[in-house]
Amino acid sequence: MRDVAVMLGMAFGGALLVSVPGALLLRALRRRSILVHVGGIVVIAVLSVLAGVVAVAQGMFISPHDRNTLMVVVGLSGAVSLAIAILLGRRLATDAMWAHEARERERAAEASRRELVAWVSHDLRTPLAGLRAMAEALEEGVVTDPETVADYLRRMRGETDRMARLADDLFELSRINAGALHLAPGPVPLGDVVSDAVAAAAPVAAARGITVRAAESGWPTVRASEPELGRIVGNLLRNAIQYTPGDGTVTVTGGRDNGTGWFAVTDACGGIAESDVPRVFDVAFRGETARTPGVAGDGGGGLGLAIVRGLVEAHGGRVVVANITGGCRFEVRLPAG
């Protein structure tokens, strides 16, 4: 028992000589990657075992041949353990990075949901209060002259239409975020979709004194689902018209290069603040302060551009925005049909 106790003490002392400096080194490297930590732990463990074996071997007075053989065995085992640790460490590092990114996405999504709830609550509270006031005025006979009654009814219709658009945008956005969007992509002439969207937006643009121009030729055929593509173009046009001042011009152009079809909507909004550019496609982000002062919007829910990005990415395309002289340019690229 005495010999066993002596060997245990020698093994513990040899391992301690390696593990204590190793622990201090790992503490100094605590901000490094998981791979470095896993490799360090394995190296410290192998060296601790090796130090203990050397101490015991010296105490046992074994032959040099046996001692060298033992060192080779321990060294090879340590090398194999280190290789396995590096492989596992890489996997752990990848999983940890994925988990970190997933947590960041979850936090961003939660923040976006909270912001969306706040925006929608605000956007619903105002028109609902107005509708209630006008309905009570009509019900109680406060307003009786035909002209005012007609004006109240017209304003009530406008508010209900706006809330209906908001509900429609929320439904579309929920489909995109839930992965419930089922596309039926096929060859779609982009020029026809743009022509229909421009015709639909023309009355609103004309009422605000805004000119909408679309290129007459050069339109490509893209691979897309036509209803969703029409919504992409329509949302971008409505956004451009909303922020373009009176007597301004909104231009739609398109073409094909590098195997993709593209179209761009250019407005005269005065530009977007550089700090707001990365957030333009975020849910419920309006950024009125980033646009030309004094330009009144239509009170939308701030979901149009978020829907555009979701639909474009669902098609395997991308959408970008850039400031130009006097305004900004939204460009959408989709696979060529």
Image (cartoon, helix red, strand yellow):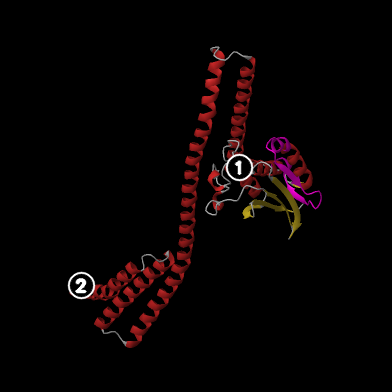
Give the answer, above or below, for where 323 lies relative to 14: above
In the orientation shown, which residue stands out farthest toward the left? 2
Q: Give the side of residue 297 with respect to residue 250, left or right.
A: left
Residue at 30 percent of width and 80 percent of height = 54
Q: Give the side of residue 93 with respect to residue 212, left or right.
A: left
**Amino acid, disc 1:** Ile
From the viewer's perspective, is the residue at label 1 or at label 2 nearer?
1
Residue behind mark 2: 5
Q: In terms of image quadrants, where is residue 240?
A: top right
| Residue 187 tag number | none
Residue behind mark 1: 176
Secondary structure under the numbered disc 1 in the rendered image? helix
Foreground residue among 68 and 162: 162
Give the answer, above or below, for where 64 lies relative to 91: below
Q: Give the side of residue 186 with respect to residue 125, left or right.
A: right
Query: Marks 1 and 2, how far apart in space?
Result: 69 Å
| Residue 189 appears in view | no
Residue at 42 percent of width and 77 percent of height = 76
Q: Position of residue 62 (x, y in %)?
A: 29, 84
Foreground residue among 45 and 185: 185
> Is residue 221 covered in magenta?
yes
Residue at 56 percent of width and 44 percent of height = 293
Q: Which residues are magenta?
A: 202-228
Give the answer, above or below, for where 102 lies relative to 64: above
Secondary structure under the numbered disc 2 in the rendered image? helix
Give the answer, above or below, for where 309 lies relative to 58: above
In the orientation shown, which residue stands out farthest toward the bottom? 64
